[in-house]
Image: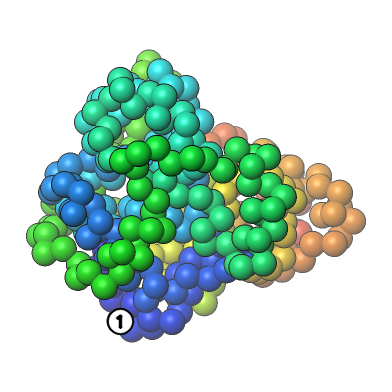
């Protein structure tokens, strides 16, 4: 929180988030997360409460996470593609009573709500932070077809409405210290059912500082952007990549679905990022994409790639470094 606040004071108009051709500045991110914190407190969230996020990589995720922290809450991001049974278990394990939910997953959440402690559901549409022309096209051509159009049930809230309602509300006066719990991330369940692992605010800042110190020789502070291909409900995305970007003041390029290669390539063309993290299958898929093979995508802005989650073939590393002219590092958790 303090990292974003200091950046907003130093360079309020500098891009913090890049999304689908739109930009959200540090000043805007600070104001919106202040407003969301005020929303949560007004709806009964107290220090130590859990706020669940069932949202893909988009600005609303970080507005929700930062706002929940400012309200003193512990953020519990969840993979919205999990089954209802799995999500019910996770929601009950963490005891979340409030959830920020993408409209694509709203009906799923409402179906399982009676089996949980959820009492406040805040819905948000993926298009809310699209640039105007793209928002119109999405509304007309894709919103209903792809399942993003919903009818809000009585008692639930629209994120956009409440953010406007509390736009001038001051940040809640909740004391949040470095040793307070900040994040509750669930494991993938490889050793049984998913288990929650908690992080303090201090540990998240330290992780970001370590990553930023490691990458400082390659990435320029403020200017070099980072593509967020890892899901923000995953440790690699939320702790590793976002922490690096926020501490180093590197704009975060949010990608809702890294598996949509056409969209990812369009994003790379548009934002010319310096840091591209991913998994071996992603790098292989990019190398084999027809437009990449035809030399129609310029990767020369990329200075650094991190590959994790699975072994990286030496040939993949060699080919991708030749394509970008940058460095590719293999990491293990």
**Is 92 displayed left or right of 128 in the figure?**
left
Q: Quadrant of residue 292?
A: bottom right
Quarter of the rendering containing residue 159:
bottom left
Residue under the point 25% across and 56% down: 39
Residue 63 shows up from this direction: no
Residue 255, above or below 96: below
176 up-or-down from 143: above or below: below
Q: Is residue 146 visible?
A: yes
Instruction: Give the color scheme: rainbow, by chain, secondary structure or one colour.
Output: rainbow
In this picture, residue 217 sits left or right of residue 143: left
Give the percent coordinates (x, y) of residue 209: 33, 62
Identify the image quadrant of the N terminus.
bottom left
Residue at point 26%, 73% (across, down) = 168
Image coords of residue 315 (percent x, y)? 74, 43
Q: Residue at x 23, y 45 (%)?
A: 74
Q: 250 or 323: which is nearer to us? A: 250
**Depth check: 83 or 97 in front?**
97
| Residue at the image point whose x is 43% and y is 41% from the top | 152
Q: Is residue 156 left or right of residue 93?
A: right
Q: Residues within 10 Å of mark 1 (few under 14, many from 20)?
A: few
Element class at badge 1: helix
User: Residue at the front extreme?
Assistant: 154
Horizontally, residue 159 falls left or right of residue 17, namely: left
**Image coordinates for residue 284, horizontal then vertical, percent:** 73, 42
What x and y, as percent, mark residue 176? 13, 58
Residue under numbered circle 1:
9
> Which residue occupies the extreme top position in the image?
192
- Report the quarter where the C terminus lies: top left
Q: Nearer the viewer, residue 234 or 93?
A: 93
For residue 258, above or below residue 216: above
């Amino acid at each position: 929180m303090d990292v974003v606040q200091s950046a907003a004071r130093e360079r309020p108009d500098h891009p913090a988030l890049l999304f689908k051709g739109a930009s959200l500045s540090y000043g805007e991110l600070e104001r919106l997360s202040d407003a969301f914190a005020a929303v949560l407190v007004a709806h009964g969230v107290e220090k130590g409460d859990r706020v669940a996020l069932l949202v893909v990589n988009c600005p609303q995720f970080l507005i929700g996470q930062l706002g929940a922290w400012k309200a003193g809450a512990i953020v519990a991001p969840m993979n919205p593609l999990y089954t209802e049974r799995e999500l019910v278990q996770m929601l009950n394990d963490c005891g979340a009573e409030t959830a920020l939910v993408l409209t694509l997953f709203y009906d799923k959440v409402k179906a399982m709500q009676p089996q949980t402690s959820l009492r406040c559901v805040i819905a948000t549409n993926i298009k809310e932070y699209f640039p105007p022309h793209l928002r119109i096209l999405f509304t007309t051509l894709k919103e209903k077809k792809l399942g993003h159009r919903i009818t809000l049930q009585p008692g639930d809230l629209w994120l956009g409405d409440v953010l406007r309602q509390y736009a001038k509300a001051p940040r809640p006066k909740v004391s949040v210290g470095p040793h307070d719990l900040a994040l509750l991330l669930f494991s993938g369940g490889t050793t049984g059912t998913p288990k929650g692992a908690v992080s303090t605010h201090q540990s998240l800042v330290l992780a970001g500082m370590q990553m930023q110190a490691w990458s400082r020789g390659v990435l320029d502070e403020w200017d070099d952007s980072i593509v967020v291909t890892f899901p923000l409900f995953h440790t690699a995305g939320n702790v590793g990549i976002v922490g690096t970007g926020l501490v180093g003041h590197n704009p975060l390029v949010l990608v809702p679905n890294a598996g949509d290669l056409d969209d990812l390539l369009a994003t790379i063309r548009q934002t010319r990022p310096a840091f591209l993290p991913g998994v071996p299958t992603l790098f292989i898929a990019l190398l084999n994409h027809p437009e990449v093979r035809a030399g129609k995508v310029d990767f020369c802005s990329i200075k650094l790639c991190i590959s994790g989650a699975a072994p990286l073939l030496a040939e993949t590393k060699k080919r991708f470094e030749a394509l970008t002219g940058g460095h590719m590092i293999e990491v293990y958790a």
